[in-house]
């Protein structure tokens, strides 16, 4: 699976958009980008995933560059409860690789302050 | 149950002792994963079960680590002769099936078992 690179930490003011970058320059054509977050003392929580097109759900938006070598997770109006570690994962979607697990790196620690 | 349940939530043990950690997945979930998270680190994959297929043990760090799962129910992670380096939070996750994780991202985690080896 392709390796991802994320900044160690980021700060964001409450109410502002949080833009979390992820580089995955070695991504291959059948690899998806997944984002999870882990709030302190809890297990990780799924946020969003995508292949080529930008995606949006009730939690966030995912912007994937045209060459797919990087992506940005956007929390449009960050709140204090969004303070967490955010993990960007690149993984083959389905097929005969379905049996292997998602591999989490160290992620980005996002601190939202008032 | 409503979510993935893990026990004990906290375990303190002495070096050299054996420990067992338990995971109750969400009812009906066929895929079950164990991860380890050391302080300040990301999640390390340990082992994965999918239904009655042979488990993927590729992430187990040593032969002191083993896990079992009977059918599609409870799983137990056993660490023998614990070492201080085994101190970590052990997280269990489940999904309806493995392919669903990749197609939807739906992977549900428990709150973990914090193991401290003195």
Image (tube, grey):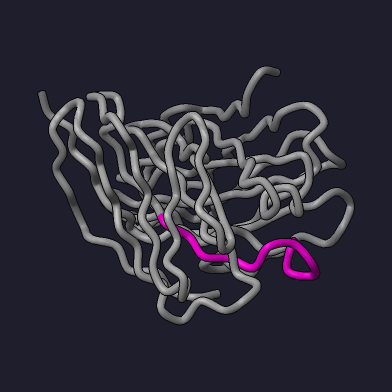
Please provide percent x and percent y for residue A107.
Answer: 33, 55
Asked if one can make out residue B64 in the rendered structure from this viewpoint, the answer is no
Give yes or no for residue B118 being in the magenta stretch.
Answer: no
Please provide percent x and percent y for residue B27.
Answer: 78, 26
Q: Quadrant of the C terminus of chain A?
A: top left
Q: How many marks?
A: 0
Q: Give whichever of A85, A11 is nearer the camera.
A: A11
Query: In the drawing, does residue A66 fall left or right of residue B52?
Result: left
Query: In the drawing, does residue B110 fall left or right of residue A42?
Result: right
Residue A15, image quadrant: top left
Which span is picked out in magenta?
A: A88-98
Q: Give whichever of B106, B45 is nearer the camera.
A: B106
Please provide percent x and percent y for residue A5.
Answer: 32, 68
Q: Quick check: A36 above or below A67?
A: above
Q: Give whichever of A104, B66 is nearer the camera.
A: A104
Asked if one can make out residue B50 in the rendered structure from this viewpoint, the answer is yes
Query: In the drawing, does residue A62 fall left or right of residue A112?
Result: right
Residue B2, image quadrant: top right
Q: Quadrant of the N terminus of chain A?
A: bottom right
Q: Residue at x 51, y 28 (%)?
A: B8
**Outermost residue toward the left in this view:** A114
Q: Residue at x 67, y 40 (%)?
A: B94
Q: Residue at x 56, y 55 (%)?
A: A50
Please provide percent x and percent y for residue B18.
Answer: 53, 47
């Amino acid at each position: 699976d392709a390796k991802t690179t994320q900044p160690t930490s980021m700060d964001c003011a409450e109410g502002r958009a949080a833009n979390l970058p992820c580089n995955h320059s070695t991504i291959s054509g059948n690899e998806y980008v997944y984002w999870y977050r882990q709030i302190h003392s809890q297990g990780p929580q799924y946020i969003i995933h995508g292949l080529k097109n930008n995606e949006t759900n009730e939690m966030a938006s995912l912007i994937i560059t045209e060459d797919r070598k990087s992506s940005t997770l956007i929390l449009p109006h960050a709140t204090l409860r969004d303070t967490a570690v955010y993990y960007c994962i690149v993984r083959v979607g389905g097929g005969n690789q379905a049996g292997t697990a998602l591999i989490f790196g160290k992620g980005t620690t996002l601190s939202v302050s008032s | 149950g409503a979510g993935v349940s893990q026990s004990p939530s906290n375990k303190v043990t002495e070096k050299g002792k054996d420990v067992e950690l338990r995971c109750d997945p969400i009812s009906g979930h066929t895929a079950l994963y164990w991860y380890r998270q050391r302080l300040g680190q990301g999640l390390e994959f340990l082992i994965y079960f999918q239904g009655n297929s042979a488990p993927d043990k590729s992430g187990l760090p040593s032969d002191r680590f083993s896990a079992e799962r009977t059918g599609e129910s409870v799983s137990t992670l056993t660490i023998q002769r614990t070492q201080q380096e085994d101190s970590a939070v052990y997280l269990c996750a489940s999904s309806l099936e493995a392919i669903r994780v990749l197609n939807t991202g739906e992977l549900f985690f428990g709150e973990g078992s914090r193991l401290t080896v003195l």
